[in-house]
Image (tube, helix red, strand yellow):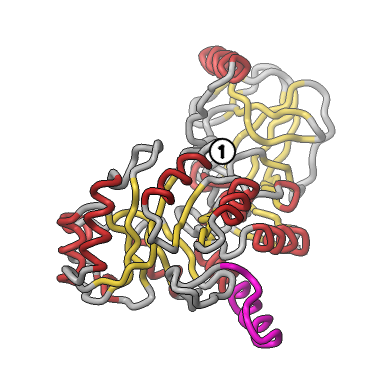
């Protein structure tokens, strides 16, 4: 039984190349489930991109983009740096990637003080408090750091006065750390260019900035307005999943049978209408029907959420599988590795081994196989 993420490799990589052209110095984000691809695969892909950039630079005699190392004017190749979400993700990424790794979660002495990889020279740490800055310097002298500013995201970060104190501590040699820049994690949806401008204007001496969730147009305008600075986009979803027609999930039909009205099926013996009963690969272990809650910000989204809740309350649960363009319904919640689904009415029975398209979020998916074609 196989649950598959299918990838049109040529189209997917064309999209990656386009994103790199649009965002010079782009920093790929490789975290969590690897956006459905797995972190090991994405780390290897980043290494391929890094090697391609280095080869191109060697042939051309230099790098033709604006990113620099730490804002000190030294050109760097594309994909010299990737981001991970947590320290726990570092080993898997470094196993496949030969550049540097920025850890997005802020270093906390109380949480990460005993982490084995703190002194790895490939790491760039994120810091947002003085106590943690000092604690990191004690445990990893000479380590590279970025200082995180508190944005309207209001998750991690320091207010401008605290950022100034941290920058001064590094610049003044109070701690033995190397400054790699200032980092800002912005909310989704765009419209935060002005917020980034306020931060840059408040720290005119800082040459290197890492930002997330700006559009390519916003980043381009900022690079034009602050031509003497390095503004590097951290990009995950837009990079790996930005061309949704280049990847898709499928589950294999493992069993198919016509059923009469009243037939029981599943762990709980649900009675079925007449139709077709299928056993399909793809269950909770793959993330099927385990999606994160939606924001339901628009009236339509709220109406859909209410309708789905009413259907679920009466035992009708829409599955993410489709058969010949028709929505299939769960017989019961998915099992660990398979799902029982039902199609009412007269439908041609799929053959064992047929692959059914699955509509689901890649960020909650754990396929058995990633198949490049």
Q: Position of residue 170 (x, y in %)?
A: 24, 66
Q: Main secondary structure of the magenta part?
A: helix
Q: Is residue 169 left or right of residue 317?
A: left
Let me know if residue 217 appears in the view.
yes
* Nearer-the-camera pick, 206 or 182: 206
Residue at x 71%, y 49% (from the top left corner): 243
Residue 181 colored in magenta in the image: no
Q: Is residue 143 left or right of residue 82?
A: left
Residue at x 70%, y 64% (from the top left corner): 17
The quadrant of the picture occupied by the C terminus is bottom right
| Location of residue 100 (image quadrant) | bottom left
Tell me which segment is drawn in magenta: 48-66
The residue carrying mark 1 is 190
Rendered position, 320 above or below 37: above
Let me know if residue 1 appears in the view.
no
* Nearer-the-camera pick, 347 or 33: 33
Q: Helix, strand or loop at disc 1?
A: loop
| Location of residue 307 (image quadrant) | top right
Q: Position of residue 52 (x, y in %)?
A: 66, 78
Residue at x 38%, y 75% (from the top left corner): 122
Q: Position of residue 239 (x, y in %)?
A: 62, 55
Q: Position of residue 73 (x, y in %)?
A: 49, 74
């Amino acid at each position: 039984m196989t649950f598959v993420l299918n990838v049109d490799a040529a189209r997917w990589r064309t999209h990656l190349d386009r994103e790199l052209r649009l965002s010079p110095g782009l920093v790929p984000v490789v975290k969590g489930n690897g956006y459905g691809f797995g972190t090991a695969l994405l780390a290897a892909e980043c290494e391929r991109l890094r090697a391609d950039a280095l080869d191109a630079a060697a042939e051309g005699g230099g790098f033709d983009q604006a990113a620099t190392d730490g804002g000190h004017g030294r050109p760097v190749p594309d994909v010299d740096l990737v981001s991970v979400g947590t320290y726990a993700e570092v080993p898997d990424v470094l196993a496949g990637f030969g550049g540097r790794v920025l850890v997005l979660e802020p270093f906390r002495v109380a949480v990460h003080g005993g982490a084995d990889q703190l002194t790895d020279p490939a790491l760039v740490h994120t810091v947002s408090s003085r106590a943690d800055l000092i604690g990191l310097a004690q445990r990893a002298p000479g380590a590279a750091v970025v200082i995180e500013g508190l944005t309207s995201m209001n998750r991690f970060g320091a207010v401008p006065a605290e950022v100034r104190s941290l920058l001064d501590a590094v610049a003044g040699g109070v701690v033995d750390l190397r400054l790699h820049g200032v980092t800002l994690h912005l909310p989704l949806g765009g419209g935060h260019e002005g917020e980034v401008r306020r931060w840059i204007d408040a720290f005119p001496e800082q040459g290197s900035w890492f930002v997330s969730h700006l559009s390519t147009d916003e980043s381009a305008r900022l690079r034009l307005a602050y031509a003497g600075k390095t503004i590097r986009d951290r990009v995950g979803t837009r990079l790996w999943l930005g061309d949704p027609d280049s990847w898709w999930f499928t589950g294999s039909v493992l069993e198919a049978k016509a059923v009469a009205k009243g037939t029981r099926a599943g762990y709980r013996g649900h009675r079925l209408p007449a139709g077709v009963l299928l056993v399909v690969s793809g269950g909770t272990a793959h993330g099927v029907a385990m999606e994160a809650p939606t924001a339901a910000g628009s009236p339509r989204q709220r109406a859909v959420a209410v309708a789905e809740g009413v259907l679920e309350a009466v035992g009708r649960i829409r599955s993410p599988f489709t058969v010949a363009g028709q929505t299939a319904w769960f017989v019961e919640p998915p099992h660990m590795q398979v799902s029982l689904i039902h199609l009412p009415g007269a439908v041609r029975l799929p053959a064992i081994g047929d692959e059914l398209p699955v509509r689901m979020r890649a960020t909650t998916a754990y396929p058995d196989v990633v198949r490049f074609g």
